[in-house]
Image: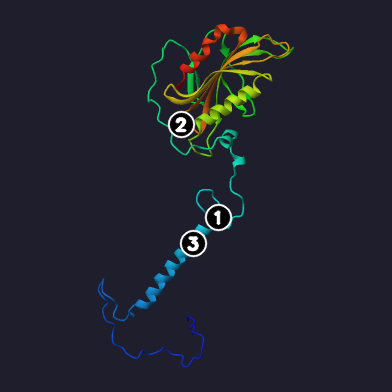
Amino acid sequence: MPETSFPAGPVTRLGPRVPASIDPPGPPAPPGFPDPDARPPNPRRRLWWFAGVAGVVLLAGLVAVLIGSPGDGRGLFDSRPGPGTDALPPLARACPAPTAPAANPPPTAPALDPSIARTVDAEAGISYNAYGPPWQPWNTVWRAGTLEVPYKIGQHFVTEAGYDGFSDYHASILSAAVPAANNDSYAFDLECVGRQVAADVRAEYYPQPNRLESIRDERTVLGGLPAWVTVFRLHFQRTGLKATDELVGLAILDVGKPTAAILYVSIPGTHRQYDYVVDDALTSVRPT
């Protein structure tokens, strides 16, 4: 016999409880109609429920605004200092981004002779003419000057081997990409960057003191790209070195990246028969 359990409280009878009415229950309400025995909803209670949900959503949004602020990922209560100018690349620190957009250069460049070999620097975003012997491919990385421009691509040849007992002197056609814009911006002051790079070349690449003979220093367009071109001849003296001057050509190009493209061409005075390469290489620049 199954056990009969009762709820807590006084038990007044052991037999089954007789219902007050023995009328059979009525048929269920058709679908879509309210149950006549159900209590009607309380409109005021529903209004308070919606108001509570809205308050929670508003509070969550306020907390999100206080915790995080747009742009730098720091909140209003974050006491950490924001990114300063010291975190920027040297050229971006020295050359703030221009406030006015630069004039658009011509969209196309003159066609090149397809029979002439090309040097392609995909990282810098440019290509330029390649030359036959004595020019050879550049096969190292030279981080030059205080700007540490990483020249990885180009050509060179030795003009004086072991001039000081262990170093070689070179003629060179080298290219590189160097950070020039602020953070993820694509805009930079082309003239300022061009002048900074040229000053670094003169101060760090060559013997000191030296005398500069300026030939060209201007904004122009190379291969459809905005460019700042500087050409000069430096005069100097170094013990053991036969060359006492050098023709230098520099192009700083805006290739639509946060980095500027640099083409650096140097011809020692002992090999002036190759001076033409400066203008020829600069004129041959095209975007990749």
The residue that appears at 46% across and 31% down in the rendered structure is 256
Q: Position of residue 237 (x, y in %)?
A: 69, 14
Identify residue type, mark 2: Gly
Q: Position of residue 18 (x, y in %)?
A: 37, 90
Work out whether mark 2 precedes mark 3 in sequence or the reverse, and give the earlier one: 3
Residue 128 seen in render: yes
Displayed quadrant of residue 79 = bottom right
Between marks 3 and 1, how big is the CA–CA gap? 12 Å
Up/down of 171 relative to 149, above or below = above
Residue sitting nearer the eye, 103 or 254: 103
Displayed quadrant of residue 222 = top left
Badge 3 is on which residue? 62
Asked whether the residues under the numbered discs 3 and 1 touch, taking CB atoms below 8 Å apart as contact, a structural biologist would say no
Specify the label residue 75 is tagged with: 1
Q: Which element type, helix, strand or loop, lies under badge 1?
A: loop
Labels 2, 3: front one: 2
Identify residue type, mark 1: Gly
Q: Which element type, helix, strand or loop, lies under badge 2?
A: loop
The residue that appears at 69% across and 11% down in the rendered structure is 241
Identify residue type, mark 3: Leu
Work out whether mark 3 precedes mark 1 in sequence or the reverse, and give the earlier one: 3
Specify the label residue 256 is tagged with: 2
Asked whether the residues under the numbered discs 2 and 3 touch, taking CB atoms below 8 Å apart as contact, a structural biologist would say no
Q: Is residue 17 left or right of residue 194?
A: left
